[in-house]
Amino acid sequence: MGTLVGVDIGGTFTDVVVLDETRGNLQIGKVATTPDDQSTGFITALDGLRVSYPDIDLVTHGTTVATNAVLERDGGRCGLIATRGFRDILELRRRDRPHMYGLTGSFEPLIPRDRRLEVTERIAAEGTVLTPLCEEEVLEAGKLLLAQWAEAIVISFMNSYANPEHELRAKEILQAEWPHLYVVTSSETLPVYREFERTSTAVVNAYVQPNVGQYLEQLEERLSERGYGSDLFIMQSNGGMMSAASVRNLPLNTVLSGPAAGVIAATRIAAESGFSNLITYDMGGTSLDVSLVQDGKPLPSSGMDLEFGIPLMVSMIDIHTIGAGGGSIARIDQGGLLQVGPQSAGAEPGPVCYGKNGTAPTLTDANLILGRINPNYPIAGVAGEKFDVAGARSVISETIGKPLGLSTEQAAQAIVTVANNRIAGSLRRVSIDKGHDPREFALFSFGGSGPLHVGYLLRELSIGQGIVPYYPGIASAWGCVIADRRHDFVTMQNCLLSELDLAAVEQTFADHLAAGEEMLAGENVPLERVTVVREADISYEGQTHVIRTALPSGKLSHENIAASFRSAYLQHYGRVEEGFSGLEELLAQIPIRLLNLRTAVIGVRAGVRLKDFVKAPETTLAEARKEERSVFVDDGHITCPVYDRAKLPWDAVLSGPALIEQPDTTIWLEPWCRATVAEGGSLMIEVT
């Protein structure tokens, strides 16, 4: 296209990639995130690379604005209008509780009870009108909510997935009276059954809408002032990008924006070296995002819990997130045990070693003390940003070392060990816990902190191959640059497969495709082709949970839908062991129920390979060796070579222990590791 820009804003750093395809030039940058106004860090990162805004053809952005609004309870002031008798559905939930044992913990709904109102209406489960909508009550409810300064109103009526007539009419009434108001209907947001999940998803969308809308307005204004004349695109949780205009209506699609971009980057970069099965982990300054890629495709999910009692049911990449990043705070709990995370020092004040008035010891402080991070190397490659080693040593000694009877180095090593075990547990959760053998996958490590821990994780999970991309610290920003465009649709069916009207199914998929193509056509981004993924949520009759099943690409029949589901069912729950050969015959006798039809309409862009923009260095391995440094390993100091990654020649082989430095991260090769430099600069790491 020309000049492409990807910007990913994390909890600690804002990463930027500027790719000039015409000149074959690639620039990267990293600045501290500005939590009070993320657009400030966004513009600062671009200005630091001295880009010419009028020459930029496309900007794609991974953002955490929607996620932060929910987690920090800083979203818009919302109201809810529900069917009479159902105002408390957000608090009734599924009668679950924050902790399995004991009546402990609390739950705070995004909309308090005094802003949840009821109106007279009722739709039957099959879509017929049982009680007409009382329009006067809708108008009165709107007045009451506006009197309480509501910025957005959610309309969620019983069984509106089967017939949205009442919700749409209520929306029409409110918008006619108050055109400035955000009005969200559950039937337009998530037209499927399960009242609580549908209502919760609509509430999340409304809750983050004012924040996301204001942020995008500020960002677009700043870009326009500098001469950028094209549309702004935002990464979605499903791994595709969509226009900022579309995001304003459905901001909930951006909840896993940045992490999804990282998985897309990992999938594409690994494919350049011939790997299609991956366990990916993105470890930045604040969080750890873990995912699994099988046969070159990130595993999909139909939703997640943003936190306890707040489910969000939209199509997304299956990503498991925990609070385990470089800024994760180490502490001793009430039982005297060392814990690391989930609390983080974030961008402000950051780890103690950043010298910005941080007071809590973090994982980054520990790695610095152990010698794995160069104390004389600028933080994130930014000139003038130096580490405060003395401060880091002091805080770890006082808060961790002395209480546990450990030296400063031993305390730092203990922090790293605890963090490593937490990371390994997350990798097991997306692999072993879901029936996948980690030994059949490569481990793709990225994020500013991830490569410091790759060697331990390879050995701990018996994974044969680790991959560290050339720019691990800005991988998510690279994912923004290369992402395709994507729009997802879902329509409920809820019938036995034997009773399924195949002609109606084909028409539903055709309608989804037409709507997707219309949206793609209005977004003005060159595409190579449009592809369609057809799926269905299916279960055996009587089961609560469904299996998201890929459907055949050709003509559908009851038989090939059933075969696809049974295959997916056995893959999800495990293979049929010897001695249980009758299981398949038994399953064949149970009726199958199809709940939802899903379509992903994907606008595929021209492929861009990272390795095409990384030049082979004209240096030897000896010339890449910068110095030697003492590193604390296994209760003692050892001397390790330190290499400049930019000077490592292709096919070079390095044996651990060793350190490899670059502006956006440091790679620590454990004593039991060996790394080979692949074409394009990716490091292939294995346990020796």
Image (cartoon, rainbow, N blue to C red):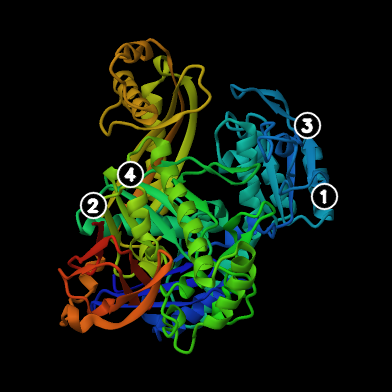
Q: Nearer the viewer, mark 3 or mark 4?
A: 4
Q: Which residue is mark 2?
A: 275
Q: Are marks 4 and 2 in contact (CB under 8 Å)?
A: no
Vertical order, 130 against 492 (above or below): above
Residue at mark 3: 84
Residue 141 is left or right of residue 683, and the answer is right
Q: CA distance from mark 4 to mark 1?
A: 57 Å
| Amino acid type, callout 1 | Lys
Which residue is identified by label 1? 143
Contact (Cβ within 8 Å) of mark 2 with mark 3: no
Q: Nearer the viewer, mark 1 or mark 2?
A: 2
- What SS does tag 3 mark? loop
* Residue ID at (69%, 31%): 95
Label 2, label 3: how many angstroms apart (C-alpha)?
55 Å
Q: Residues within 10 Å of mark 3 (few under 14, many from 20)?
A: some
Residue that numbered label 4 is attached to: 438
Q: CA distance from mark 3 to mark 4?
A: 50 Å
Mark 4 or 1: in front is 4
